[in-house]
Image (cartoon, rainbow, N blue to C red):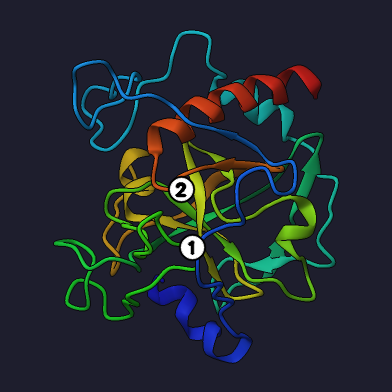
């Protein structure tokens, strides 16, 4: 968790939900499994975008950033109040709803929690935690350096994400400066702070991913598709494939 959010977490509490999301299909959640590219171990059928490590290419019929942003210009607020972007920031970020998704517009702090890696560890991040709210299929925490994911607020009096169909492994679209990147809900944070994503998500968007000094102060849109799920949660190729499909559906229905 980025240092800017940690200050309030002690006072407000960090919701941590151990273990993986519920079994596939248990509650009608939409999910997807994507086969690996034939003959290429460890790869997926969606090519990586040139020059953007850790990202996957966006196919020609994929939803564009401008189209998605146009659909979320207006907010039908569902949170009982507004969130803070940081501990000392004003509470002015509502959670909004459109058919098939919830969304908010905020900053991006860097979540480097989970597996210890070269760039995410107690040395690079003084507030490093060796766990994430949701876990990989092998039981280990998520790898924030490699897996693009977002952090959602813990359930509290402002909003309960699960009541809106937002759960671990749910598919998200994150938009910043004309780029759209897909990922999953991978961690939870304080109950009154919003706007955080993994090292890998930040890097794929061209945002400085350094857990000490990185992130961006504004201009990030998070769209979370209701009742969606990638299984296993660490399958980023599947998140991209399902995310593109759900984004097109979101555009068609709103």
Residue 35 versus residue 98 in the image, above or below = above
Label count reads: 2
Q: Which numbered disc, 1 or 2, marks the residue that appears first in the sequence?
A: 1
Residue 123 disc label: none
Q: Is residue 246 left or right of residue 80?
A: left
Residue at far bottom of view: 11
Residue 143 versus residue 229 in the image, above or below = below
Q: Which residue is mark 2?
A: 233
Hey, which quadrant is residue 68 in on the image? top right
Residue 163 x, y percent position in the rendering: 79, 58
Residue 134 disc label: 1
Q: Do the residues bearing badges 1 and 2 touch, measured as CB atoms within 8 Å?
A: yes
Q: Residues under labels 1 and 2: Cα distance?
A: 8 Å
Q: Residue at x 29, y 54 (%)?
A: 209
Q: Is residue 98 left or right of residue 134?
A: right
Kindly state the secondary structure of the residue where label 1 is placed: loop
Residue 86 x, y percent position in the rendering: 54, 71
Q: Residue at x 85, y 45 (%)?
A: 76
Kindly state the secondary structure of the residue where label 2 is placed: loop
């Amino acid at each position: 968790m980025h240092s800017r959010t940690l200050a309030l977490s002690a006072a407000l509490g960090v919701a941590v939900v151990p273990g993986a999301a519920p079994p596939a299909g248990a509650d009608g959640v939409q999910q997807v499994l994507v086969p690996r590219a034939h003959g290429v171990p460890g790869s997926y059928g969606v090519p990586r975008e040139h020059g953007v490590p850790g990202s996957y290419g966006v196919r020609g019929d994929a939803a564009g950033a401008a189209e998605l942003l146009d659909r979320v210009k207006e907010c039908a607020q569902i949170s009982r109040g507004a969130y803070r972007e940081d501990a000392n920031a004003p509470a002015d970020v509502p959670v909004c709803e459109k058919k098939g998704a919830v969304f908010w517009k905020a900053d991006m702090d860097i979540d480097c929690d989970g597996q210890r890696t070269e760039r995410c560890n107690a040395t690079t991040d003084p507030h490093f935690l060796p766990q994430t709210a949701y876990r990989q299929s092998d039981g280990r925490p998520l790898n924030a350096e490699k897996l693009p994911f977002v952090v959602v607020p813990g359930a509290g009096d402002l909003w309960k994400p699960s009541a809106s169909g937002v759960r671990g492994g749910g598919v998200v679209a994150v938009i910043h400066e004309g780029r759209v990147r897909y990922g999953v809900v991978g961690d939870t944070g304080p109950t009154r702070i919003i706007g955080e994503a993994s090292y890998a998500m930040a890097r794929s968007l061209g945002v400085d991913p350094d857990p000490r000094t990185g992130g961006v102060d504004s201009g990030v849109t998070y769209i979370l598709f209701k009742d969606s799920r990638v299984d296993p949660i660490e399958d980023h190729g599947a998140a991209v494939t399902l995310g593109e499909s759900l984004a097109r559906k979101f555009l068609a229905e709103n």
